[in-house]
Image (cartoon, helix red, strand yellow):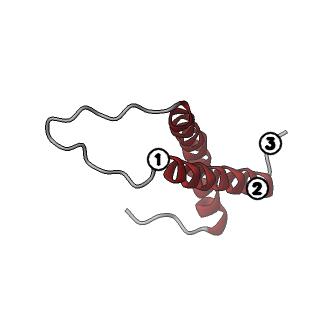
């Protein structure tokens, strides 16, 4: 049985919300990104920082294929193909 558009849209929204939450948590954990001054070593990452980075990466990797499938399906459904 194939997935309905409504089910795909629900999974897409869930994945998008996961990405948003993961990147918000990453920003809270690590703070704003800053360049490493010349001659200094990169800072050591704590386990919490590594875990936040991993979750953000995994959330994005799960989201991208769903995003592409959702928008391809939606464009086909609405008869509104993307302009190149």
Judge depth for marks 1 and 3 and give the one in front.
1
Secondary structure, mark 3, is loop
Secondary structure, mark 1, is helix
Looking at the rendering, in which quadrant would you find the N terminus?
top right
Picture residue at 31% right of the left edge, 51% below the top:
34
Earlier in the chain: of badge 2 and badge 1, it is 2
Residue 56 lies left or right of residue 33; in this view the side is right
**Label 1–label 3 contact, CB within 8 A:** no
Earlier in the chain: of badge 1 and badge 3, it is 3
How far apart are the alpha carbons under marks 1 and 3?
41 Å
* Neighbourhood count class around disc 3 (C-alpha, 10 Å): few under 14, some 14–19, many 20 upward: few
Relative depth, front residue between 66 and 49: 49
- The residue beneath circle 2 is 10
Earlier in the chain: of badge 3 and badge 2, it is 3
- The residue beneath circle 3 is 2
User: Eyeballing the image, is 83 above or below 31?
Assistant: below
Judge depth for marks 3 and 2 and give the one in front.
2
């Amino acid at each position: 049985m194939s997935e309905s558009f409504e089910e795909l849209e629900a999974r897409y929204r869930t994945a998008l919300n996961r990405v948003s939450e993961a990147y918000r948590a990453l920003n809270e954990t690590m703070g704003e990104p800053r360049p490493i001054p010349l001659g200094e070593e990169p800072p050591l990452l704590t386990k919490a920082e590594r875990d936040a980075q991993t979750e953000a990466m995994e959330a994005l990797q799960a989201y991208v294929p769903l995003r592409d499938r959702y928008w391809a399906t939606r464009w086909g459904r609405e008869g509104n193909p993307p302009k190149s």
